[in-house]
Image: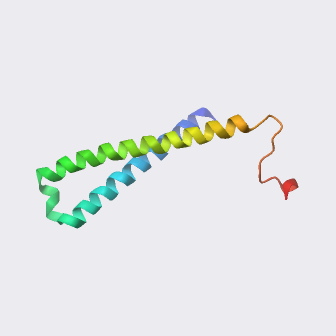
Amino acid sequence: MSIIRHIFFFLLQFAVAALMVTAICAAVTLHTYGWQYRLTPEFATKLHSYINLGLVAGALFCLILLCYRATRSSLEGPDDRPWNNPDNI
């Protein structure tokens, strides 16, 4: 797989993870305080902290993916076959 494709999917996974954490936190807050709470300055402050939390969670998720990929590629030798090779079954 080309490096551009890896970078694209890596950034996509980061964006999805950050967006999911932010959206879930905002949804729980709006569910707890009511829909009209979204118009208050307190919600804007909370949303800013939720965005920061989402960015941190996305970064940690991508760090885990990078560590997994580095470990997996370092353990594979040049003669290793994929685990789902029909000869292994």
Residue 16: x percent and y percent? 43, 50
Relative to 50, does residue 37 appear above or below in the rendering? below
* Residue lying at the far right of the rendered structure: 87
- The residue nearer to you, when weighing 86 against 77, is 77
The residue at the point 12 percent across, 50 percent down is 41
The residue at the point 24 percent across, 45 percent down is 48
**Split into 4 quadrants, where in the image is the C terminus?**
bottom right
- The residue nearer to you, when weighing 18 against 74, is 74
Residue 61: x percent and y percent? 48, 45
Query: Quick check: 73 left or right of 5?
Result: right
Residue 62: x percent and y percent? 49, 41
- The residue nearer to you, when weighing 62 against 38, is 62
Query: Quick check: 25 left or right of 44?
Result: right
Query: Quick check: 46 left or right of 63?
Result: left
Residue 19 appears in the picture as rendered: yes
Quarter of the figure with residue 25: bottom left
